[in-house]
Image: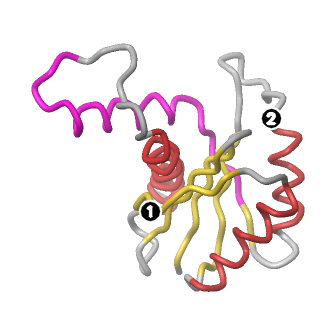
């Protein structure tokens, strides 16, 4: 079964797809966040087109393991998506930092890591990569069950 991973942000929504066997995730794109209803519609269209059977939403927690304020929007998005497809949460704590490290290494081979990390204009790649980190984390847990 194919899975769709989502890194929800106030400006952009990172997306990742798994392979058909559901064993590995790949960054696949970014949507501009046009609000919960419009975003849910775009995501469901993509899920249908890609024959996705399950969606994994990043669960935004702070370092005290409490939900961040953005979770109200994420919950609303989940509500709209669940009308058509199964949805699960996966903790997204640290996923953007992990994606940033990977992308920095890809764009700056052999260079010391800087605070900025991802070059100007590559933010979309960061959001999609964070979605892939979220989805790969979920998929790895499924294999170990």
| Sequence-first disc among 2 and 1 | 2
Q: Secondary structure at mark 2?
A: loop
At x 56% / y 55%, what residue is drawn?
30
Magenta part of the chain: 88-112
Q: Position of residue 82 (x, y in %)?
A: 83, 69
| In front of the other: 114 or 26 | 114
Q: Which residue bears the numbered disc 2?
A: 70
Q: Residue furthest front?
A: 121
Q: Which mark is residue 94?
A: none
| In the displayed structure image, the side of residue 39 where residue 8 appears, left or right | left
Please, is residue 138 above or below residue 100 in the view? below
**Distance from Cα at disc 2 to Cα at disc 1:** 30 Å
The total number of labels drawn is: 2
Mark 2, Cα crowd under 10 Å, few <14 / some 14-19 / many 20+, is some
Please, is residue 89 above or below residue 113 in the view? below
Q: Secondary structure at mark 1?
A: helix
Q: Which residue bears the numbered disc 1?
A: 143
| In the displayed structure image, the side of residue 39 where residue 143 appears, left or right | left
Residue 110 in which image quadrant: top left
């Amino acid at each position: 079964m194919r899975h769709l991973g989502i890194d929800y942000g106030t400006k952009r929504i990172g997306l990742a797809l798994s392979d058909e066997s559901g064993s590995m995730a790949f960054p696949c794109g970014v949507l501009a966040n046009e609000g919960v209803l419009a975003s849910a519609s775009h995501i469901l269209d993509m899920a249908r087109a890609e024959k996705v059977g399950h969606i994994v939403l990043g669960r935004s927690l702070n370092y005290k393991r409490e939900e961040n304020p953005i979770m109200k929007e994420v919950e609303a998005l989940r509500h709209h998506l669940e009308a058509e497809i199964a949805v699960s949460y996966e903790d997204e704590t640290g996923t953007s930092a992990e994606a940033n490290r990977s992308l920095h290494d890809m764009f700056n081979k052999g260079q010391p890591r800087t605070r900025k990390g991802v070059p100007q204009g590559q933010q979309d790649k960061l959001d999609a990569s964070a979605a892939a980190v979220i989805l790969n984390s979920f998929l790895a847990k499924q294999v170990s069950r």
